Amino acid sequence: MEEEKIIEESKEEQENGSEEMDNDNSQEEIKVERKLVIPGETIVSGDDYLPGDYTKKDGDNVVSNRYGLAEVRGRVVKILPISGVYEPRRGNTVIGRVSEINFSGWQIDIGGPWRAFLPLNECPRFINRNNVAEFAGVGDVFNIKVWGVKQGSVDLSLKSRGLGKLEDGRIIKINCHKVPRVIGKEGSMINLIKDKTSTEITVGQNGYVWLKGDIDGTRKAEEAIRLIEKEAASEGLTNKVEEFLG
Amino acid sequence: MGYTKRSDGRKMDEIRPMRAEVGVVPNADGSALFATGKTVAIATVYGPKELHPANKRKQDRALIRCEYHMLPFSVSERARPGQNRRSKEIGMITENALAAVVDLKKFPQSVIDVQVLILQADAGTRCAGINAAAMALAHAGIDMKEMVASISIGKIDDKIVVDITKEEEDYEEGEGPTDIPFTLTSNGKECTHLQLDGKIQTHRFKEAIDAAVVACEKVLDVQKRALKGEIVNEGNK
């Protein structure tokens, strides 16, 4: 990333699931200035400002607590992370792979700092305790919702529309902070890739991306996603990707 | 005669040319390279991630684990790979130096793994390692109160010198060599790590602290520039 100030439209964390996620939370299309900061750096000083996400007040200064893009919107100063592992939040739709089975449910790898668990009763249909593997075995991939985050563990649920097992295909991992860019405004970017490569794609908010299609298509799609991940900060990305996909 | 001129022609309070870069290891969550003179360190950070075995988990905070390795080719006589007494000690020192600024409460029961690899050693490797590790932690998006910067201050004969080399470390005339590695935080200039190898008079020690504060500011500037996307190279090969 460059040191220069990066200006782009506002994008917020989405709470809608995977593909449906859109990038457009603001009716007012204001341009907000962003600046790369390191931990401990003073972003702004003065009484007028309030500390938001990943910042704290130290005397008159608002100080960064994390590496990322600092944004001053009105009086609130916050940092948009650009790196780091996925932080599970209630309501996120993520992609995970079953890593372990026991009598009460499935242990699922969704990345992030904690283990995630899908209990039997969060399945859409009844499953006998003695036949848990019948529904899903180790290695199966799910599009799944984060139901709750406790300290040290994450609970998952399949009881929602659009969730369920993803058959076949493969998973690639990307930086979870670049997910909104990969999806694009109202899914524009991801739909572009889907159309051009005739690949089925599902993007989880944890940065896991599921791809299904023929070999050439998925490879092209993966390359396109990597391109977006690499150049997430630049403008006119949709055109670049369109050009890349030919 | 005494120690009047440094062997590499630097001024007494001059740091060796530094080199720094982040994102050198694509597969890690955060990574950084830090070099000062011929000393080169790479640090990688993985996590926060699930900690195994579960009995090592801390209920109210994350664990930070640091490893320090001198690679076999880092010194002129092949270093035996793997842990030894010295690397365990420096790993622990690094851990303590960093834990003071990292917000461990945010992801309880998880672990942050930090690995420091020394590619070339010419004294001051623990300082270069801590500098690289601090950059890698920030690069990995881990919550930190502030940064840390580390520097080794020496007393060679009766002169206080900054960022000593192996040659100076081996200077045996007069009062002999003393090596004092400092790690200071970026804002408060609080000390998170201090060691002393050798002898120094109390009043000279104050001079050493002053030298460290000035030198750490320079190191911090390099760290900051590297984190902001620059590939810093002050004529370091």
Image (cartoon, rainbow, N blue to C red):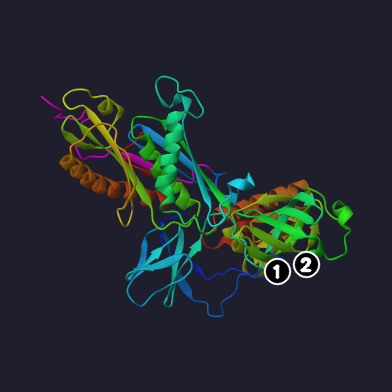
Quarter of the image where one finds residue A225: bottom right
Q: Is residue B229 visible?
A: no
Give SS at disc 1.
helix
Position of A93 compared to B89: left or right?
A: right
Q: Which residue is mark 2?
A: A162
For residue B71, above or below residue A17: above
Quarter of the image where one finds residue A206: bottom right
Q: Which residues are magenta?
A: B1-25
Under mark 2, the amino acid is Gly
Location of residue B98 in the rendering, given as x and y in whole percent from the top left corner: 42, 48
Overall secondary structure of the magenta stretch? loop
Sequence-wise, the earlier of marks 1 and 2 is 1
Chain identifier of the residue bearing label 2 in the image: A
Location of residue B163 in the rendering, given as x and y in whole percent from the top left corner: 28, 37
Going 67% across and 68% down the picture, which residue do you hit?
A91
Q: Which residue is mark 1?
A: A20
Chain identifier of the residue bearing label 1 in the image: A
Position of A89 compared to B232: left or right?
A: right
Farthest left residue?
Answer: B1
For residue A117, above or below residue B119: below
Front-lying residue, B107 or A146: B107
Going 18% across and 41% down the picture, which residue do you hit?
B202
Q: Are marks 1 and 2 in contact (CB under 8 Å)?
A: yes
Going 47% across and 25% down the picture, which residue do you hit?
B72
Spatial CA distance of label 1 from label 2 is 10 Å
Q: Is residue A102 visible?
A: yes
Front-lying residue, B67 or B4: B67
